[in-house]
Amino acid sequence: MFELYLLTFNCARTLADPQSLAPSFFDALPKGAPVPDLVAISLQEVAPIAYSFLGGSYLKPYFDRVTTTVQLAADLHSHGSQRLEHVATRSLGMTALMIFAKPSFTQRIQWIQSAGAGVGFSNTGNKGAVAMRVGVSCPTSASEETLNLSFAAAHLAPSEKNVGARNKDWENLVRNLVFVNHDDSAYSSSEERPLLGLSKAPSEHNGLFATGSHVFFFGDLNYRTHDSLPDDKAHESFPSMTAAEGSSKHYSQLLSRDQLTREKEANRTLHGLEELPITFPPTYKYSTSRSSDEEWQWAKHRYPSWCDRILYLPSHTSKLEPQIYTVLPVQSTSDHRPVALSVRVEDTPIPAHGNRVEAPFSINPAWKARQDAARRWEVMVGASSYLALTRKGNAMLIAFIGVLLGSWWIVAWLCR
């Protein structure tokens, strides 16, 4: 068995604060557990839209903050005796997936495939998912067969009323998340350590539900606890952080209204995926101010909800043991709380027939054309946003206008 750790965090387009996040980063680990062998992090709203859509070097400061957080967390948890190193990062629009591992475990990673699909405006990545499938060598396997782990970081449609849109987002992601080898396209911003590559990666163009893989789907899934926005007085009945469990003000009273639970039971979304019981407060929406040092406040214009979730699709032939599913403390940089899950995974390859659930939707034959068209929109929106919404972009725009006016004046003067 090896230890896997998953964390999802909506960064609210702001740089993460390592000093705030690192001390609680491993709160989902069982007592006395070591630093996990493998860590996968789902990030939503990782940076402002201009930087996110342009990608590349514009995102580096945001990813560097997360890397610093992970390394500091490992150092704090192990008192300096264990470390985690960055393995790979993939981003699509405003959503990103980062993978870290112990150095000894990195040597076992044989290949990585990636996938991405936007579900925002014109299929762009202001909402969507980015995924990686990782092939891990197994000490007990005599062949070069690998244990395959599929991670999908997702961000679905917002607002209380958009349940149908979130369900449709799930369908579009299943249909358009198609894994490929050596993805160096502009659509997938990537950074990756050299891998051993001793095993051949499986064939390309498989979907999220491809046989022979554990699947983890996690992120800001945006399912709420009401189907409409709160009225002016609704906040008076919002749960209190200090209420006793039997109280009507305890957060558990809201769980019966959870849209994701309802939609899953009706077989309308996240088909076949499982989730540990929720025993923690809503993860959204927190105000940036609080009335005292003890209690954070809910934002009054949104119902408190469990937007941030971690689900998984286990195999019946390779044991998956979820351990602890919990929420981390409120971060002053975001209106969402991070959520984490620790899992023990059996070191056994999954045979091709090892999945219990068939894909609920078929792969879109035009997924690549859809992806390329969306990327063109992203470049246009990213460049426009950069010019309009950033100081450097404003300066460039003013300089360009100045050059145009200057050129017009010179031409007009010469033509006198």
Image (spheres, rainbow, N blue to C red):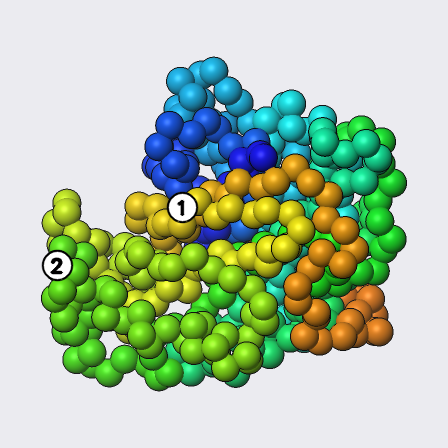
In the picture provided, is 389 more to the left or to the right than 258? right
Position of residue 329 measured from the top left corner of the image (x, y, whole percent):
31, 46
Task: Say which quadrant the C terminus sits in.
Answer: bottom right
> Which residue is at the front of the view, 298 or 407?
298
Q: Return the residue at label 1.
A: 324
- State left or right for residue 207 relative to residue 398: right
Q: Residue at x 63, y 23 (%)?
A: 103
Q: Confirm or deny contact between disc 2 and disc 1 (CB under 8 A).
A: no
**Where 295 falls versus 99 (above or below)?**
below
Q: Is residue 118 visible to us here?
A: no
- Disc sitting over residue 244 in the figure: 2
Describe residue 183's horizontal placement relative to residue 284 as left or right: right
Amino acid on which the number 2 mark rests in the picture: Ala
Pick whichever of labels 2 and 1 is earlier in the sequence.
Answer: 2
Query: Which label was assigned to residue 164?
Result: none
Question: Which quadrant of the view contains residue 231?
Answer: bottom left
Q: Is residue 45 left or right of residue 301?
A: right
Going by the numbered disc 1, the residue's amino acid type is: Ile
Residue at 64% across, 47% down: 318
Which residue is located at x 60 percent, y 31 percent?
101
Q: In the image, what residue occupies the spot 56% across and 64% down?
A: 273
